[in-house]
Amino acid sequence: MSTPAPEPAPAPVRPGTLPLLLFASTLTVMAGSILAPVIQVIRGDLQLSGTEAGLIITTHSLSIAVTSPLAGWMLDRWGVRLPLAGGLVLYGLAGGTGLVADSYPALIASRVAFGAGAALVFSGTTLALLNLYKGPAQDRAMGWRGTATSMGGVLWPLLAGGVGGISWHLPFGVYLIGVPLGIATALLLPRERPKGAARPAGERLGAWQMLRRHRILLVWYGLQFCGSLLLYALVVFLPQRLAESGVEDPLLVSLYTVGMSGAMSLIGLAYASLRTRLAYSVLLRGSLALWTAAFLLLAVAPNAPCCSWRRCCSASARGCSSR
């Protein structure tokens, strides 16, 4: 009876690699949330319908879904370094196109290209962390990644809201951070192709064979689909709902996105403790109940709560009064 081949040791990690990958991981939450604070301003300036405005935020998600299989093939074929570096550069350049785009078709085209870069960034950063770190170091790296991603969900929308009050074009400039990150990735990540553990040819399954053998994956993918649908429903429709309540200032709109990311961070920190007490089914039912309550509250709330920050909501938030 043959013994499985030992898993190869991870490639040597250069100083600065982990901070680079953690920084790149924050770009995952930047993809759509950074535009939420200014989407109503874009809609008014370009005279768009609600559906057209929503597509500016969500088109890249469709592009990610279509190009992710190709991204996976590229990562498997050439390793992480070059595809991830190229994806970051494409992410930055395509996302930054919004700085100069003044038409709806140009924005949509740039978001399609942006999604292709984002697919490489999402998959590449995950694979790089899994390949470069093993054992306890891998656990620490993935834990730090979760923290970095949560912090990105707080910091990037705030930055977008701050500069969005000057011009709706400026938040697109934040995407340009992908370009220097791509150059740094090409310089820091190992040049050799990461090698996974060897598997007999008979154990290699295609996508359809894997789904037929493990049908529970369809349930998991369905849950992921529903979660993404609910999340993007908030990103797309929350700014429109806030505008109905008189809150249109980009910085104020960003605070709602930040609040959502902050709540996600807190739940993430408490998840291990919750999991020891509650079964997965209970957690899923609790999540569904919270989503339902959130959407019902958004639907029936007569106006947005006023901010005590800066003594009152900004003048454009007409539904608030000074405190």
Image (tube, grey):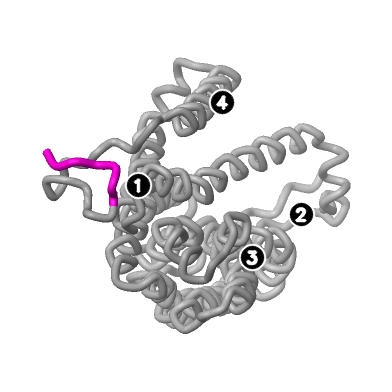
Q: Nearer the viewer, mark 2 or mark 4?
A: 4
Q: Residues within 10 Å of mark 1 (few under 14, many from 20)?
A: some
Q: Position of residue 177 (x, y in %)?
A: 39, 75
Q: Secondary structure at mark 2?
A: loop
Rounded to the nearest whole Å, what is the CA distance between mark 1 and mark 4?
Answer: 29 Å
Q: Which residue is mark 4?
A: 288
For image coordinates 16% across by 46% down, the residue present is: 312
Rounded to the nearest whole Å, what is the CA distance between mark 1 and mark 2?
Answer: 59 Å
Q: Position of residue 133 (x, y in %)?
A: 47, 57
Q: What numbered label is drawn on residue 246?
A: 1
Q: Which residue is mark 2?
A: 199
Q: Which residue is mark 3?
A: 195
Q: Secondary structure at mark 3?
A: loop
User: For residue 320: magenta?
Assistant: yes
Rounded to the nearest whole Å, what is the CA distance between mark 3 and mark 4?
Answer: 40 Å
For image coordinates 68% across by 60% down, the residue present is: 62
Q: Which residues are magenta?
A: 317-323
Q: Is residue 105 left or right of residue 70?
A: left
Q: Is residue 138 above or below residue 163?
A: above
Q: Please tell me which of labels 1 and 3 falls first in the chain.
A: 3
Q: Secondary structure at mark 1?
A: loop
Q: Residues within 10 Å of mark 3 (few under 14, many from 20)?
A: some
Q: Position of residue 257 (x, y in %)?
A: 39, 48
Task: Name which residue type carries label 2.
Answer: Arg
Task: Name which residue type carries label 1.
Answer: Gly
